[in-house]
Image (tube, rainbow, N blue to C red):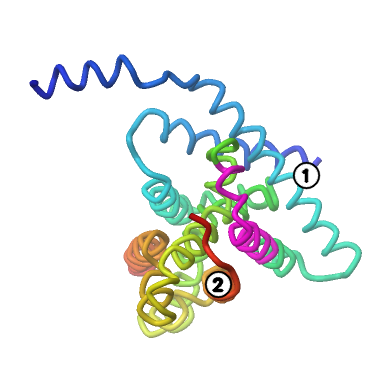
Amino acid sequence: MIYLSAFIICGTICAIGQIILENSNFTPGHLNTILVVVGATLSFFGLYEPIINWGGAGATIPITNFGHLLFKGAYEGFINEGFTGLIKSLFTLGQVGVTVSIIMSFLVAVCTKPKH
Amino acid sequence: MKLEEYKKIVNKNSGKEDKFKNVFISFIIGGFMGLLCQMFCTFLNKEIGIKIEDASMYTTIMLIVVSSIFTGFGFFDKVVSFAKCGLIVPTTGFAHAMTSAAMDHKSEGIIKGIGSNMFKLAGSIIIYGIIVAFFLALIKGVI
């Protein structure tokens, strides 16, 4: 059953993104920025955790999850240590994707020749 | 020629893509991405015994690695032009933006090319994510 809800959630987020792209002259970069902000805002209102519980990986692979992880890390840090904790742990959950992306894109860029 | 007339001509001659069809394609492709990732996540959780949060982390890592390598081989762009948002919105789009920016500027050298241009496209995602998350967490924490 979780497979169906993962399909629906991920498909819906992608379809919303496509609707935004179709009805404006945004680039994919604009779109992903908007979606990260939306993810952080949903997480602010406590709505993203239930979506993850329902949709599983369908909710954790879209870029909205990055905003959710940033907010979650920052808020947990604030609860534990106050303002110090907020600064220290804003990146603790969200850094996985960034770290792996940097390493992988560096390796790929060094190892390949761009085609023109 | 006036700007309005020019816009009219552009609107008339630019090919009309079927909006509904694009949305439908992104829904289906995005849905299958979610389905496959959920299968991978469940596999890691049930068969290997990784915690569910770590399993979803490894799923994201798998997506990033696969899409970076595909971008390196050069056929990710063709797939994206067909799949549209079905591959832009999942983390694949983020990894693709970084890898293609790094590859484009490779000829300028490792430090000035790859190093300083890697975040050219994907930087705004990280920057606005951090800004919004910082202020929202501050607001929620203070309240």
Callout 2–callout 1 Cβ contact below 8 Å: no
Q: Would residue B9 be counted in the magenta stretch?
A: no
How many numbered marks does the figure carry?
A: 2
- The disc labelled 2 sits on which kind of residue? Leu
At 17% across and 21% down in the image, what residue appears? B6
Horizontal side, residue B10 vs residue B25: left or right: left
Residue range of the region highlighted in magenta in the rendering: B61-80
By secondary structure, the bulk of the magenta-drawn segment is best described as helix
In which quarter of the view is residue B131 placed?
bottom left
Horizontal side, residue B16 vs residue B38: left or right: left
Q: Would residue B69 be counted in the magenta stretch?
A: yes
> Please, is residue A88 above or below residue B143 in the view?
below
Residue A93, which numbered label?
2
Residue B102 drawn at (x, y percent):
46, 68
Task: Report the residue marked by disc 1.
Answer: A2
At 30% across and 14% down in the image, what residue appears? B12
> Please, is residue B82 above or below residue A58 in the view?
above
Residue B24 drawn at (x, y percent):
60, 26
At 53% across and 53% down in the image, what residue appears? B93
Looking at the image, is mark 2 or mark 1 earlier in the sequence? Answer: 1
